[in-house]
Amino acid sequence: MFFLASTKKYVFFSWEWNILNTIYPDRKRVGSFSGEIMKKQKNSFSPRAISARMAYLCKTFPFVRIKRCGTSLCNRPIEALVMGCGRKTLLFVGAHHGSEYLTANLLLDFAEELCRAVDAGKKLFSFSARELLERRTLILLPCVNPDGVALALCGASSDNPLGRKQIAMNRGSEDFSKWQANARGVDINHNYNYRFYRYKELEKGHGILPGRSRYAGDYPESEPETLAVCRLVEEYRARLSVLLSFHSQGEVIYYHDSPLTRQGARFLSRTSGYSLEVAEGLAAYGGLTDWANTLSIPAYTLEIGRGENPLPRDTAPLLYITLREMLISSLAFF
């Protein structure tokens, strides 16, 4: 894949087109990529579309099942795809933040290519897809924060009390494209029980209130979305070999530098091309991977893509092509 400056389009190599044709079989092969080709509109990334795509995979491939993890504040389902039968279990999580909905799409692209390879008895890189799922269990939770995704894509309505409150939390703006929090203005990835009360002290100093991002909530795991993830982690805790939490953007992997995570961090960096960093400042408090590390689970936060959130929707296939090797080979490494 390379960028053709004269046409402002990405051009894919033939092997990359084969991958995209597997994941998006209805798209015409045209030799270059622009936002119009994929026809990825807002509705394609909505919580309803995510659930529909998960249901399609479950219906099409008998070795896939859907696990209901919980419901959001606005009663949207929080669901995971489960496949494989190995004891070692990998958990990949996306869309903690509303404007980072491309992370959900990334995980579903991965799920679809993997399922089709298993069904066809094909190899992915040098790995037999069937053998990977015989030796591992894979859990994909594409969208932790469906309410936040809906707000980021469609905004809030001033016709109801909740919508008016959300607009007020958004500083009076009806533009929710950069919204990260859940429906009541809590940033879910600061709501986990890791140095939570120290963060609350910092929160006061920075004047952080319920709103678009960074507000941690009243107490750890106060939000149904956080609880859904925590219960899932606790259920599989003894079997989890790794937890990857996908965010955007920056092309960086955040981790706690320790013997528990060091080898895995080097592997993820090598196969993704992303740099390694240790989180600092406000980012070092209340996150899912911070909390998971305290349970002796190797956990990493991956910031996909580069630019400003929300990343352009037409870059979704590029993100998958870039991280495909890392996603697939993780099933063999961890």
Image: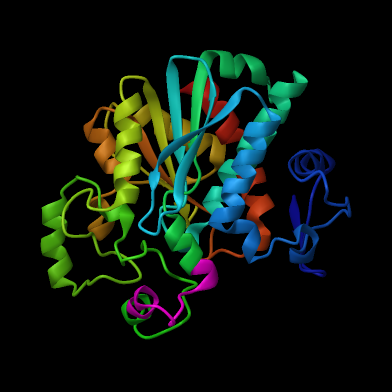
Residue 84, percent from left and from top = 55, 20
Residue sitting nearer the eye, 316 or 139: 139
Which residue is most to the bottom? Answer: 172
| Magenta-colored stretch includes residue 164 | yes
Residue found 51% across the figure and 18% down from its top: 136
User: How many marks overall?
Assistant: 0
Tell me where residue 306 appears, x and y as whole percent.
Answer: 54, 59
Rendered position, 67 above or below 199: above
Residue 310 to residue 122: above or below: below
- The residue depicted at 76 percent of the width and 46 percent of the height is 24
Q: Is residue 118 above or below residue 18?
A: above
For the C terminus, which image quadrant?
top left
Q: Which residue is depicted at the point 57% across and 59% down?
A: 46
Observer-nearest residue: 162 or 207? Answer: 162
Q: Residue 7 at x, y = what percent?
A: 82, 69
Residue 268 versus residue 140: which sits nearer the camera? 140
State the image quarter where residue 48 is shown.
bottom right
Q: Is residue 241 visible?
A: yes
Quick one: 287 or 256, which is closer to the camera?
287
Give the colour scheme shown: rainbow
Question: From where the camera sits, is residue 308 visible?
Answer: no
| 249 part of magenta stretch | no
> Which segment is the magenta one?
152-165
What residue sits 66% from the left and 21% below the top? 129
Location of residue 114 (image quadrant):
top right
